[in-house]
Amino acid sequence: MKNFTWKKALPVVTLAASVLVLAFLLLFDQEFRQIGPELHRVSLWCLPAALACMVLMWSFEAGILMVACRDIPGHVTYGRAFRLALIGQYYSALTPFSSGGQPMQIAYMQRWKVPTGAATTMFLLKFVYWQVLITLAAGIGVWRYFAMLTQSPGLLTAVMIGLFISVCATLAGILPLLRISVVKPLGMGVRFLGRIHVVRDQERAMEGVTQWSADFAEARRELLRRPLRQLVLLVLTAGQMVALLAVTYVLYRGFGLNGTTFEGVLLVQCILTVAVAFVPLPGAAGASEGVFYLLFATLFPRGLILAAMILWRFCTYYLHLAIGPVVLLSDQLASHRS
């Protein structure tokens, strides 16, 4: 028991909790007994195509990281960026609000001599671009499918709350990117933590804050003074988003369905993403499955919705939990060899 840490137990606990939530939902679903025949209706090309969408999503994220890192100190190759993308997705899947991905990515980038403040700027900019795109798309989706949403008042309420929080999160992300010094508010935070004895050496902490702020400001200046580079990052972010959302459309067509357009399925998926993004559970467990079931019940026939939800959840969530430890282990072995 001496070697037990919650950090080591977190992946197991998260996976167990997610599986239990999914099992609970399935056992109380009357269609669960028909899941076998439903899955047999899926075309052979469907799952490989859905997995290809995920690989494409990781590739776009790696491209975003590599392009953004050109303007900040350090050396990030495409191979490193791809590994970093998988690590980020893994820790996001493990933590509430997907909050663990970017801090772990920033920690990993320190190995490649990337200053923490500069890395923070890059990930903040990446977060803002994602939030702007997903919020706009979800807003269009709500406008287009408002009549469908009104049929379930509880779902409509959840979607509108999620959309409001998404707008607030976008604005909160934009503010630090403006030419405003963050030293004073951070200094106030350090002094407060010092008074409650969380920070013992306030002088050293303030030196760290000052250095972080200088790196942040320099990276912000370098990143934002290249409009063409920002356009490239925006396009890559849009590609990443479409690749992830396209998994649902691939599954939709894999079941032999064609009554809804690619655009229509993506807009509904954007609504789902915004509705569950701020559920305080790893992977928004329970909420993701429930909202998928409610939203896509009008697009998938009743006999197929359960199988579609399981395949979608496997591709977009459990796959990250499975691949993440493999990437981390290979990274540690490579570090030991070098």
Image (cartoon, rainbow, N blue to C red):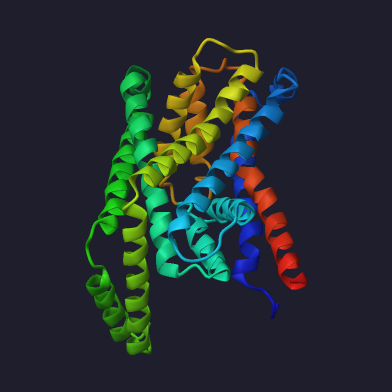
Residue drawn at 32 percent across, 82 percent down: 206
Q: Is residue 216 left or right of residue 290?
A: left
Q: Estimate the x, y position of residue 255 in percent, counting from the top left.
A: 65, 17
Residue drawn at 50 percent across, 23 percent down: 296
Decide if residue 99 is in sight here.
Answer: no
Where is 30 relative to 317, above or below?
Answer: above
Q: Estimate the x, y position of residue 94 in percent, counting from the top left.
A: 57, 55
Where is 157 relative to 218, above or below?
Answer: above
Decide if residue 201 is in sight here.
Answer: yes
Quadrant for the N terminus in the image: bottom right
Q: Estimate the x, y position of residue 316 in percent, counting from the top left.
A: 59, 39
Quadrant for the C terminus in the image: bottom right
Residue farthest along the top direction in this orientation: 259
Q: Estimate the x, y position of residue 329 in percent, counting from the top left.
A: 72, 62
- The residue closer to the viewer here, 139 or 149, is 139
Residue drawn at 29 percent across, 42 percent down: 167
Residue drawn at 69 percent across, 80 percent down: 2
Q: Is residue 75 left or right of residue 131?
A: right
Q: Is residue 185 left or right of residue 136?
A: left
Count of marks, rendered view: 0
Where is 3 relative to 297, above or below?
Answer: below
Where is 318 relative to 252, above or below?
Answer: below
Place residue 138 in its image quadrant: top left
Place residue 8 in its image quadrant: bottom right
